[in-house]
Image (cartoon, rainbow, N blue to C red):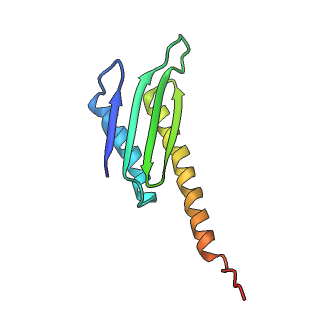
Amino acid sequence: MNIIIKSADFKVRTGLETFVREKVKKLFTQSDNIIRANVMLRKEAGRTPKNKLCEIRLEVPGYDHFVKKSSEGYGKSVSQAVDVLQKILRRNKSKLIAARQAPALVQI
């Protein structure tokens, strides 16, 4: 389980870092194929209150999953991004299971 947390323009406090690690750790329990999770926290330009941005890239063999969410706080952004990634992982897992259970076509 390799979680890399980066931030732009600020230093991540230990409380936020542990929160991010706990949330992202849940993704590793749903799929054995995840190699690494890259988490980027930064502020978006502008004066809107929803300017705390979280980008999460899950590195999986063959392709990567990428989610970008913004809200009023970093904790909420991370939670929303992890929820979306959980849905993506569940959908991919159900597709794999359905493909395994499909009857094979027999050619004569």
Give the percent coordinates (x, y) of residue 90. 56, 57
Is 36 on the left or on the right of 92, as rendered?
left
Q: Quadrant of the C terminus?
A: bottom right
Locate residue 18: give its quadrant: top left
Outermost residue on the bottom side: it is: 108
Outermost residue on the top side: it is: 47
Asked whether 24 or 66 is in front, the reply is 66
Is 20 on the left or on the right of 73, as rendered?
left
Is 101 drawn above or below residue 33 in the view shown?
below
Locate residue 92: give its quadrant: bottom right
Is 79 drawn above or below residue 46 in the view shown?
below
Q: Residue at x 36, y 22 (%)?
A: 8
Is 6 drawn above or below residue 91 in the view shown?
above
Give the percent coordinates (x, y) of residue 87. 57, 51
Q: Residue at x 44, y 46 (%)?
A: 58
Q: Residue at x 40, y 28 (%)?
A: 41
Q: Residue at x 52, y 47 (%)?
A: 85
Give the percent coordinates (x, y) of residue 2. 31, 48
Is 12 on the left or on the right of 24, as rendered?
left
Is 41 drawn above or below residue 23 in the view shown?
above
Image label count: 0
Outermost residue on the left side: it is: 14
Outermost residue on the right side: it is: 108
Asked whether 71 or 6 is in front, the reply is 6
Give the percent coordinates (x, y) of residue 10. 33, 20
